[in-house]
Amino acid sequence: MQTTCYFDDFLLYYKKAKILEDRNFGVLPLGTKCDDPLMDNITIYDTIHRKYAGFSNMLQQLWYGSENPKVHHRVNEYDELRHRWDRTTWLYVFLVHRLTGSGASFQHDHGFRNTILPSFADKCNEIDCMTEVIRRWNVPMYTSIGNQIPAFPKPKEGYANGGKYYICEFSPQMARDLMNWFNANGGTKGIREVVDWCLDWNTEHGCKRFKFVLTAFVMDIAEYMPDLVDPRSHANYGKNALESLDLMFTPDEGKPRNDAFHDEVMDFLCDTVGGMPYDVEDVLCDSIRYWENYIPKGYGHLTLEQIPNRSTIIDHPRHISYDNHVTVPMEPVKQTTKLF
């Protein structure tokens, strides 16, 4: 395989994102910038570890409490949860978070929008209490920005929608069955193996195969319970990650762009940046947005000088701003600070 100019630019992006992540952790001063206007002003470009991405904010806050690596998200009211909830309950919480859209908004409340999880923390010690909270919930608990809400089964009597029906009737049993499977089989499993188990479980119970959210769910297990799921194992690739990989690498002549090729280049990329596949997969999803100069809704207050990226790729098609900043490609902004 050969690398392209996108590979070189990805390495620059990765290093700038690390600067911003270190700032979020308090390793660097709070006002630290990476000298890339898009990344400095749009908060979705500030991480190189999936666990610390915005769509995991709520889980991270519940798990770490006052020890949250993101200093601006530290809260002490959740300090006891890591020990109060047993592992099966945590599996259920991970699953609810992903099934409801991960609290994603790409705005100021990214990772927290419409989330029901704080009510679990306030009221519940186990799954049955959580399902009762969901049954009584009468305000929004879903988001669909950057996430795929699953094709839930049709609700049975007593449920207003298929989401509540699946989350209250199917998800508790999946969490319990999965924990029993871990306990019965022993050893650490690969991400793909566990995702396949979850997909097959859904099929066996007459439900659609929710590959997007169930992959995210299994990655959460790898992050918080690495003795159950190996975080170093290969993960499934999302559409955006595959697009980034195909821009960055070309196969040798006569070889196809297939699953084996994507695993090969992922291994090469992980070795290059020193990351694990599921972390790098998440960064790849952000990098394609970066090359498109993607600006989510909610940033209409930014000026034209605050939104262009400083990518070395000058001819990649740009995403039209939701707030009508620009409707034609912007000129790239020259890097002014030596980062490395």
Image (tube, rainbow, N blue to C red):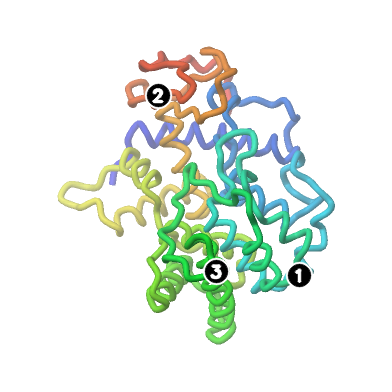
Q: Nearer the viewer, residue 250 or 188?
A: 188
Asked if residue 312 lies left or right of residue 126, the reply is left
Q: Nearer the viewer, residue 105 or 272?
A: 105
Q: Which mark is residue 320?
A: 2
Q: Going from the N terminus, do you reach mark 2 or mark 3 first?
A: 3
Report helix, strand or loop for mark 2.
loop
Asked if residue 223 lies left or right of residue 192, the reply is right
Which quadrant holds the C terminus?
top right
Amino acid type at mark 2: Ile
Report how far apart the C-alphas of labels 1 and 3 lie in the structure: 24 Å
Q: Which mark is residue 125?
A: 1
Q: Are marks 1 and 3 in contact (CB under 8 Å)?
A: no
Report helix, strand or loop for mark 1.
loop
Percent coordinates x, y for residue 156 in the rendering: 47, 70
Q: Going from the N terminus, do you reach mark 1 or mark 3 first?
A: 1
Q: Residues within 10 Å of mark 2 (few under 14, many from 20)?
A: some
Q: Going from the N terminus, do you reach mark 2 or mark 1 first?
A: 1
Q: Residues within 10 Å of mark 3 (few under 14, many from 20)?
A: few
